[in-house]
Image (cartoon, rainbow, N blue to C red):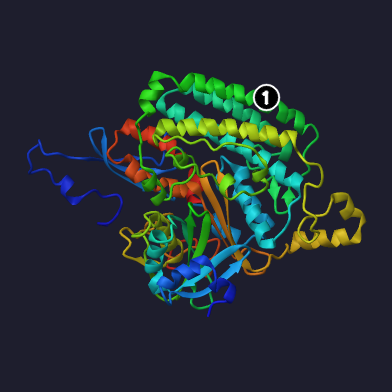
């Protein structure tokens, strides 16, 4: 087919009759299986030597129809689906979806649940940035960074397992609060983690920040202006590295973020190095937020007091008739959500994550659209890559910090 | 006619510059949704971006209200960082031969979002430079997110219609 993404320009291949000094470009596939594309992303490159003349991203290899699937599950059953959208920052997705539905229900969440959500979402942010840092540094050649980051990530995954029983796809936040009561001993485990993490971030900075190889590979690479980035739909740390201190946690606070004291790190260089600095600083800020959440954790209920939506306690369900009936209705039919539509945004580790939830008054969502940050960020791939060298393109791709599950859903 | 509370809102007053573009409006759960006539969408978006600081297009998506007509509601989520304000625009497009103008000339980020709406719902965007399928394979038949497309898909990809 003449308009297929596979066939190159017609003029390029019919070079038989032209002199061999004519300039030719080579069409090369980067991906979908490639260690540096961070997932199944296919980039069709037209190369002139090492320089990329054209770059076209081809996504959709990880499309699993999650949005369609949401329409056949009850509202609470959608929560485990959301874990798998951005599979490196699971609790962020859970949080955004739960907040969206709670906004539709106009439900009040008790402070303890809100603070636990904040604490665990910030741990998720550290988790996501660790994977980013490890894989980004690995692509550029700093292999030991990968090992260090994943060592810390093991601690985080153990924490998640302690809370929810699952290392990654925790589904720990539910509509109405948390899925399970916070486990005994969580404070001690969080204490160990929050004491250890800032020192480890210092270690990472020791390795990379003033490292001449790192600075040569990342400074001045992948520069884009703020206007271009905003116009292309980029959000998150890339915008903050271009100078605009826009963070949804500060601008449109949700889930008690306005009660926490943290900074929004910003740089102005808008290159790969600036994005690295911003994300490292964000990890430190997340540690501060976790510390504040641990120290000030309110007492009280970890689920909203809404018998029609939140499942009753197990023991009550076994002894009280009303609780049994509620449990039965909620589990078999599901709860209904008043008709309407809502667009809830949060600051996910990758940028603006928005869930557009439409309800028609029944027990199942009518439409759930996930405005995922990686989809927007990947639109910047074409201008970012065109004109750069292949080696620089690897660094730029890493700085975009996209996840294909987030992009394709 | 718009409800009084909606008529008084700042954005609606500003949109007097595009008379007759707003068909309906609602303010629900602290979010403003304006229904815009589909043939005026580019004009309204250009006005909102240039004159009203809605610098960002957060997302373009679609809701299939089958079997109600007009079937598709193309939904635009706008964001003004300087005003810290969000706005939702909705355009109802009919089910047979659904078409609407592309807003890519206003925000470049409409590019992939409109391709996704085309891919999953079949709504064509006029003047889009590259309206191809983006998530599904290039030769897929049918539009998966439509309400009359089964969740489990078809075993073989033959035409859905």
Residue that lies at the very extreme toward the bottom in this rendered image: B1
Is A392 located above or below residue B64 in the figure?
Answer: above
Give the image quarter of residue A201: top right
From the viewer's perspective, tell me whether residue A144 is left or right of residue A164: left
From the viewer's perspective, tell me whether residue B28 is left or right of residue B57: right
Residue that lies at the very extreme toward the right in this rendered image: A319
Q: Chain of mark 1?
A: A
Q: Residue at x 58, y 41 (%)?
A: A89
Which of the two residues, A7 or A271, is positioned nearer the viewer here?
A: A271
- Whether residue B149 is visible here, answered yes or no, is no
Under tag 1, what secondary structure? helix
- How many numbered tags mark residues here? 1
**Residue A200, percent from left and from top:** 59, 22
Q: Residue at x 91, y 57 (%)?
A: A320
**Residue A356, percent from left and from top:** 56, 59
From the viewer's perspective, tell me whether residue A322 is left or right of residue A208: right
Quarter of the image for the C terminus of chain B: give it: bottom left
- Whether residue A145 is visible here, answered yes or no, is yes
**Residue B119, percent from left and from top:** 42, 61
**Residue A236, percent from left and from top:** 49, 43
Which of the two residues, A63 or B18, is positioned nearer the viewer here?
A: B18
Which of the two residues, B17 or A105, is positioned nearer the viewer here?
A: B17
Is A122 located above or below residue A405 in the figure?
Answer: above
Q: Residue at x 64, y 69 (%)?
A: A339
Which of the two residues, B150 or A35, is positioned nearer the viewer here?
A: A35
The residue identified by callout 1 is A195
Q: Residues within 10 Å of mark 1 (few under 14, many from 20)?
A: few
Q: Residue at x 73, y 34 (%)?
A: A294
From the viewer's perspective, tell me whether residue B45 is left or right of residue A256: left
Give the image quarter of residue B96: bottom left
């Amino acid at each position: 087919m003449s308009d297929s993404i596979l066939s190159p320009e017609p003029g390029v291949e019919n070079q038989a009759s032209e002199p061999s000094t004519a300039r030719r470009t080579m069409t090369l596939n980067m991906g979908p299986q490639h260690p540096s594309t961070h997932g199944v992303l296919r980039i069709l490159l037209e190369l002139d030597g090492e320089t990329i003349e054209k770059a076209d991203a081809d996504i959709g290899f990880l499309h699993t129809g999650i949005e369609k699937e949401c329409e056949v599950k009850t509202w609470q059953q959608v929560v485990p689906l959301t874990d798998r959208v951005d599979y490196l920052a699971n609790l962020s997705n859970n949080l955004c979806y739960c907040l969206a539905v709670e906004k539709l229900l106009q439900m009040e969440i008790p402070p303890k649940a809100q603070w636990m959500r904040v604490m665990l979402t910030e741990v998720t942010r550290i988790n996501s940035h660790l994977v980013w840092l490890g894989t980004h540094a690995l692509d550029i050649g700093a292999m030991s960074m990968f090992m260090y980051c994943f060592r810390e990530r093991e601690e985080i995954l153990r924490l998640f397992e302690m809370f929810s029983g699952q290392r990654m796809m925790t589904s720990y936040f539910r509509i109405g609060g948390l899925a399970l009561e916070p486990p005994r001993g969580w404070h001690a485990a969080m204490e160990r983690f929050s004491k250890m993490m800032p020192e480890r971030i210092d270690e990472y900075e020791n390795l990379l920040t003033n490292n001449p190889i790192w600075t040569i590979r990342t400074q001045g690479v992948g520069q884009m202006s703020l206007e271009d980035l905003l116009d292309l739909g980029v959000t998150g740390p890339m915008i903050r590295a271009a100078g605009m201190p826009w963070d949804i946690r500060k601008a449109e606070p949700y889930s008690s973020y306005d009660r926490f004291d943290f900074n929004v790190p910003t740089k102005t260089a808008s290159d790969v190095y600036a994005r690295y600095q911003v994300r490292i600083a964000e990890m430190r800020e997340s540690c501060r937020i976790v510390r504040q959440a641990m120290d000030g954790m309110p007492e009280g209920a970890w689920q909203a007091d809404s018998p029609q939506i939140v499942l009753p306690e197990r023991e009550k369900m076994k002894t009280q008739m009303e609780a049994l009936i509620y449990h039965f209705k909620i589990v078999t039919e599901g709860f209904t959500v008043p008709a309407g539509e809502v667009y809830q945004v949060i600051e996910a580790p990758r940028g603006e994550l928005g869930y557009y939830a439409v309800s028609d008054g029944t027990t199942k969502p009518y439409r759930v659209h996930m405005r995922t940050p990686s989809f927007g960020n990947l639109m910047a791939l074409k201008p970012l890559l065109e004109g750069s060298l292949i080696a620089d393109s690897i660094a730029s791709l890493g700085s975009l910090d996209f996840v294909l599950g987030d992009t394709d859903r | 006619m718009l409800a009084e509370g909606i008529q008084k809102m700042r954005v609606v007053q500003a949109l007097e510059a595009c008379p007759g573009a707003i068909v309906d409006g609602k303010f629900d759960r602290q979010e403003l949704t304006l229904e815009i006539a589909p043939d005026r969408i580019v004009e309204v978006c250009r006005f909102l971006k240039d004159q009203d600081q809605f610098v960002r297009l957060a997302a373009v998506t679609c809701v299939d209200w089958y079997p109600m007509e007009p079937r598709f509601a193309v939904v635009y989520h706008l964001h003004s960082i300087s005003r810290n304000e969000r706005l939702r625009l909705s355009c109802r497009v009919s089910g047979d031969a659904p078409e609407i103008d592309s807003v890519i000339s206003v925000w470049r980020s409409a590019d992939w979002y409109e391709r996704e709406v085309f891919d999953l719902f079949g709504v064509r965007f006029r003047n889009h430079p590259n309206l191809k399928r983006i998530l599904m394979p290039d030769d897929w038949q049918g539009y998966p997110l439509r309400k009359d497309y089964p969740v489990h898909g078809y075993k073989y990809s033959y035409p859905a219609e």
